[in-house]
Amino acid sequence: MREAFFILIVLLALVGLTAYRYRKQLMFALQIWRTLTGAREMQMKNIPTNESENQVKGELVNCSRCGKWTPQTTAIKFGATIYYCSTRCLQSKVKN
C-alpha cells in the first residue's frame, strides 16, 4: 500500500512539474477552447426561429426619431408616412 501511495505522489509531482513547464502552452490551449466554445454559443443564439423569420418578413420602415429600420408590422404608425420603432421614440418626439 505504501508503494502505491509513493508511486502516486511521484506521478502527481511529475504531472505538476510538466504543467508548470508548459503553463503558457496550456493557457493558450485553454483560451482557444473558450473562444471556440463562445463562438459556437453565439452561432446557436443567432439561428433564427420561425417566429422571428415571420416577423422580419415584410416591408421595412425608417423610424422618424432615431432612424432605426423596423418591420412595418411592428412599427407604430403616426400619420400617413411617419413611423416610430418603439413607444419610447414616440414619447420622446411628442415631448419635443
Image: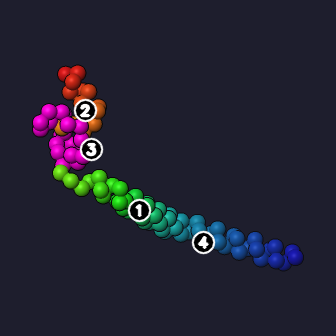
Quadrant position of residue 13: bottom right
Q: Does residue 73 show up?
A: yes
- Secondary structure state at the residue bearing disc 1: helix
Q: Position of residue 25 (x, y in %)?
A: 49, 68
| Label whose residue precedes the other's in the sequence (4 or 2) | 4
Is 95 on the left or on the right of 32, as rendered?
left
What residue is drawn where x is 60% and y is 71%? 18
Decide which of tag 4 and tag 1 comes sooner along the chain.
4
9 sits left or right of 80 in the view? right
Comes first in the chain, label 2 or label 3: 3
Q: Of the numbered discs in the image, which one, if any, rests on residue 44?
A: 1
Camera-nearest label, 3 or 4: 3
| Camera-nearest label, 1 or 2 | 2
Query: Which residue is at a point 59% across and 68% down the rendered structure image?
Result: 19
Residue at image mark 2: 89
Label 3 secondary element = loop
Mark 1 or 3, closer to the camera: 3
- Residue 89, quarter of picture: top left
Gap between marks 3 and 4 measured at Cα = 59 Å
Q: Mark 3 or mark 4: which comes first in sequence?
A: 4
Label annotation for residue 3 = none
- Give the amino acid type for the residue marked by disc 3 in the picture: Thr
Please provide the residue range marked out in magenta: 60-82
Mark 4 or 2, which is nearer the eye? 2
Of 48 and 81, the residue lying toward us: 81
For disc 4, the marked residue is: 18
The residue under label 3 is 74
Image quadrant occupied by the C terminus: top left
Q: Position of residue 1 (x, y in %)?
A: 87, 76
Number of the front mark, 2 or 3: 3
